[in-house]
């Protein structure tokens, strides 16, 4: 095996000796055209079907000793002067078309000097269709009955195809029917007599083993490469007689599969050989040709006619196309008619013709250089860069030499002696080319659905759908069956009569089936004719889209201008976005730093709250402890006072007894010392708490004389007519506690009224200190309660304010002494809150 060739960038290099891919050499064929005149000198002789020999013409001495040199060149096959177009097609192009239908790409190009018959080989002449019309005829003969409706496949600008359902395709057909000048010619039009004889191929040719469970679509495009610029020959340019508009060159692009294609190239969907060749002929009229000294109609550009075949499988029911873009297989056959290589001193070219010739020779030289580098890399294992990009021609077809399809070349030569030197260079190039090996393309597999879906669906939708009606008609037309009842074992007449009747019914049934099948076939023929008529109408309407396409082309140019402007704005936006990104990054950093500080402050605040909660717990515990101690002392004091009252009651009883006792005898008056001893003995009671300290009354008026007060008097309070009325100087009187008043004062007093147990109104003055809180609000800590009560004179007990009564003149103590339970409570007010009536019961005495 030969060493593997090096591939262009983006392709992995195949190592020397690798068996990963099978390779085939480039198929190079030679065709010798007949001489224009019989008496012309001939320099090329066909030795056999694979070899030609070049003779040195008279006047060309190539060796030092003056001898004439004869050189032989071998090809895959040589076609002589009497070879027909059919024979050439069967050997060279037929396998490429067969591969195209089976999903493989192909490249066929003709190469030779000017006037060697390249265009005749590719296009043909009157009565002799060339390779191009024969390829089209074979394609449509193979897929004619399996073609999809127009616009089921839709080309896009990314060298791929979109697929749409039958309904969308129908809507697009109807939309394009209303547009004038269709781009695709209609089958109803008369064929142009200029090429009618070229496409009238007598021999029927068809590919074998066409996938019947798929639908096909054919798209053609036609471009030329002129002065190393690519032009679309099918592009409709609006005609302006005042200021003609020059055609715009196209750019080469690379699709997602790294295949090269011409961006913005017009692709026309065709449904027959006539339509396809009419599209080709329309572009052929735009191709650049000129009259040179060597050829009256010399091609001044390389032309490329692409036939793209799109294949998609039917769904599981065999009704519609499978709506999966991944299942679409696209294969392409490129037919290239190269411009002839020529020497300028022979063509007598000047001006534009001279520049054209130089560009033609330059592109052909680049093609030859690429072949030489490919052969060198494969034969010697080198890794030289193949200069595909030096020419648009080689750059466009580099994928074929990288293993994307078969490559075939037909070398056309003119045996006349004047072309000897050019023919010699052509032979050398052919010798180099056929030593280049191209990787064999792999077979593409479509989806793994069950084969035979199309015809199974047709059978299901044909006679089967009408079977109930036919059966009913058949049953009604059949003769009645005789009696089938057998009563005697020796009955020999019933069964024969039954068999005879069944045979008649069977014969009649068979006749009716044949008649039904005949009518079904007739109906199918009518449907086919109707479908063809509809298809022709679609083709006719398709041609009305030319003017709209022209408008669209102009709009596309405007869109391109706007796109360039859009790119500039996008670049500015990108710069602004980068600047914004930098600022956003700085913002994020500052936010993170701020969050870190907030977390730190939150932790400190949490620690402070925990410490406050701990201290509050300690304060609460201490408060409860002292409250219990106060309660114990109050209980002891109450017991002592009850003892004193009991002693006084006893004294009153004795006094009463003395007063009410008859004065018969004058009793002896007990001494005061004795009474004092008795009273002391009765009044002494064990104290619950030994050595309990006396209760110290609170006197806060002198302490708060200079403070400002909030005098909170709820609106629900009742006005009393007592002599003693609470009056606080420098006070702010409010009916509802609010934050504004509390912020201006240091003391707080709540006047609270409630109904006592004896039915009288009891007024309590609840006093407290105002403190500022951490949250910006105020809190009130209650410190003292004063009670003012009004009683009837008939009451046995009098409650006075919480001041101590003075001693009686007779030395006895006051009968009643109020014992006030003093409590303190702190209520924190948040900022914006109000101290409502709900707090007025929080300081009830225990």
Image (cartoon, helix red, strand yellow):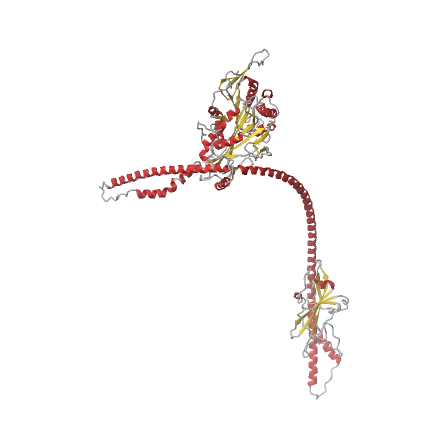
Q: Most extreme residue toward the front, as rendered? A: 242
Viewer-proximal residue among 344 and 508? 344
What quarter of the picture does the N terminus occupy? top right
Height in image: 642 above or below 11?
below
Q: Most extreme residue toward the top, as rendered? A: 65
Height in image: 295 above or below 815?
above
Q: How many labels does the image show?
A: 0
Residue that appears at 57% across and 13% down: 59
Q: Could you tell whether 43 is left or right of 836 in the image? A: left
Height in image: 681 above or below 774?
below
Viewer-proximal residue among 499 and 611? 499
Q: Could you tell whether 702 is left or right of 614 in the image? A: right
Q: Could you tell whether 662 is left or right of 501 in the image? A: right
Spot occupied by residue 799 in the image (x, y as percentages of width and height): 70, 74
Q: Could you tell whether 138 is left or right of 842 in the image? A: left
Spot occupied by residue 101 in the image (x, y as percentages of width and height): 48, 31
Spot occupied by residue 494 in the image (x, y as percentages of width and height): 24, 42
What quarter of the picture does the C terminus occupy? bottom right
Asked if one can make out residue 210 in the rendered structure from this viewpoint, the answer is no
Viewer-proximal residue among 436 and 275? 275
Residue that appears at 35% across and 39% down: 516
Asked if one can make out residue 261 in the rendered structure from this viewpoint, the answer is yes
Q: Most extreme residue toward the bottom, as rendered? A: 664
Image quadrant where residue 615 sits: bottom right
Spot occupied by residue 412 in the image (x, y as percentages of width and height): 53, 22
Viewer-proximal residue among 141 and 248? 248
């Amino acid at each position: 095996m030969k060493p593997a060739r090096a591939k262009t960038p983006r392709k992995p290099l195949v190592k020397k000796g690798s068996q990963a891919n099978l390779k085939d050499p480039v198929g190079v064929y030679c065709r010798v055209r007949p001489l224009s005149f019989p008496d012309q000198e001939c320099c090329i002789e066909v030795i056999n079907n694979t070899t030609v020999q070049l003779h040195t013409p008279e006047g060309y001495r190539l060796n030092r000793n003056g001898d004439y040199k004869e050189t032989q060149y071998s090809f895959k096959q040589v076609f002589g002067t009497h070879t027909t177009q059919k024979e050439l097609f069967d050997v060279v192009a037929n396998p490429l078309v067969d591969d195209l239908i089976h999903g493989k790409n192909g490249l066929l190009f003709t190469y030779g000097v000017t006037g060697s018959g390249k265009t005749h080989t590719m296009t043909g002449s009157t009565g002799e269709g060339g390779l191009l019309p024969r390829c089209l005829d074979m394609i449509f003969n193979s897929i004619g009955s399996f073609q999809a409706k127009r616009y089921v496949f839709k080309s896009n600008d990314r060298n791929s195809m979109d697929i749409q359902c039958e309904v969308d395709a129908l809507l697009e057909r109807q939309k394009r029917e209303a547009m004038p000048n269709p781009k695709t010619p209609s089958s109803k039009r008369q064929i142009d007599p200029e090429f009618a004889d070229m496409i009238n191929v007598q021999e029927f040719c068809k590919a074998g083993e066409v996938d019947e469970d798929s639908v096909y679509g054919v798209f053609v495009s036609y471009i030329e490469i002129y002065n190393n610029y690519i032009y679309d020959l099918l592009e409709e340019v609006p005609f302006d007689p005042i200021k003609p508009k020059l055609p715009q060159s196209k750019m080469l692009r690379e699709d997602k599969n790294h295949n090269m294609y011409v961006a913005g190239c017009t692709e026309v969907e065709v449904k027959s050989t006539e339509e396809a060749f009419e599209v080709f002929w329309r572009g052929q009229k735009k191709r650049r040709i000129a009259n040179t000294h060597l050829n009256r109609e010399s091609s001044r550009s390389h032309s490329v006619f692409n036939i793209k075949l799109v294949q998609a499988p039917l769904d599981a029911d065999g009704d519609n196309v499978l709506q999966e873009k991944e299942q679409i297989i696209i294969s392409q056959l490129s037919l290239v008619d190269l411009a002839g290589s020529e020497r300028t001193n022979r063509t007598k070219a000047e001006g534009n013709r001279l520049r054209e010739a130089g560009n033609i020779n330059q592109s052909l030289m680049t093609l030859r250089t690429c072949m030489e580098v490919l052969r060198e890399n494969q034969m010697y294992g080198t890794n030289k860069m193949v200069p595909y990009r030096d020419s648009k021609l080689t750059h466009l077809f580099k994928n074929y030499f990288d293993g994307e399809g078969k490559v075939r070349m037909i070398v056309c030569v003119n045996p006349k002696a004047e072309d000897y030197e050019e023919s010699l260079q052509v032979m050398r190039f052919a010798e180099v080319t056929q030593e280049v090996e191209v990787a064999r393309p792999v077979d593409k597999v479509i989806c793994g659905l069950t084969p035979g879906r199309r015809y199974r669906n047709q059978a299901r939708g044909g006679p089967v759908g009408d079977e109930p009606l036919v059966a009913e008609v058949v049953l009604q037309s059949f003769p009645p069956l005789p009696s089938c009842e057998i009563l005697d074992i020796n009955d020999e007449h019933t069964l024969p009569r039954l068999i005879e009747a069944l045979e008649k019914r069977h014969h009649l049934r068979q006749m009716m089936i044949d008649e039904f099948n005949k009518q079904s076939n007739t109906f199918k023929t009518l449907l086919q004719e109707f479908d063809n008529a509809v298809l022709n109408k679609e083709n006719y309407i398709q041609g009305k889209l030319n003017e709209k396409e022209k408008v669209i082309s102009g709009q596309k140019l405007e869109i391109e201008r706007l796109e360039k402007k859009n790119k500039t704005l996008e670049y500015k936006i990108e710069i602004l976005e980068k600047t914004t990104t930098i600022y956003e990054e700085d913002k994020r950093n500052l936010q993170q730093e701020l969050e870190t500080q907030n977390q730190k402050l939150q932790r400190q605040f949490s620690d402070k709250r925990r410490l406050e909660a701990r201290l509050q717990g300690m304060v609460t515990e201490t408060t409860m402890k002292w409250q219990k101690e106060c309660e114990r002392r109050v209980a002891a004091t109450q017991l002592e006072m009850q003892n004193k009252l009991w002693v006084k009651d006893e004294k009153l009883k004795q006094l009463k007894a003395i007063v009410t006792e008859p004065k018969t005898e004058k009793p002896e008056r007990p001494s005061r010392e004795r009474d004092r001893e008795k009273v002391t003995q009765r009044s002494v009671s064990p104290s619950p708490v030994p050595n309990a300290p006396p209760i110290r009354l609170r006197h806060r008026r002198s302490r708060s004389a200079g403070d400002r007060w909030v005098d909170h008097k709820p609106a629900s309070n009742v006005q009393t007519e007592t002599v003693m009325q609470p009056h606080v100087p420098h006070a702010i009187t409010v009916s509802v506690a609010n934050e504004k008043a509390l912020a201006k004062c240091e003391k707080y007093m709540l006047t609270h009224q409630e109904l006592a147990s004896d039915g009288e109104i009891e007024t309590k003055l609840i006093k407290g200190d105002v403190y500022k809180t951490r949250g910006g609000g105020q809190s009130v800590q209650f410190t003292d309660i004063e009670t003012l009560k009004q009683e009837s004179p008939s009451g046995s007990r009098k409650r006075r304010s919480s001041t101590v009564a003075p001693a009686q003149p007779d030395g006895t103590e006051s009968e009643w002494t109020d014992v006030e339970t003093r409590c303190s409570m702190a209520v924190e007010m948040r900022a914006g809150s109000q101290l409502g009536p709900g707090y007025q019961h929080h300081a009830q005495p225990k």
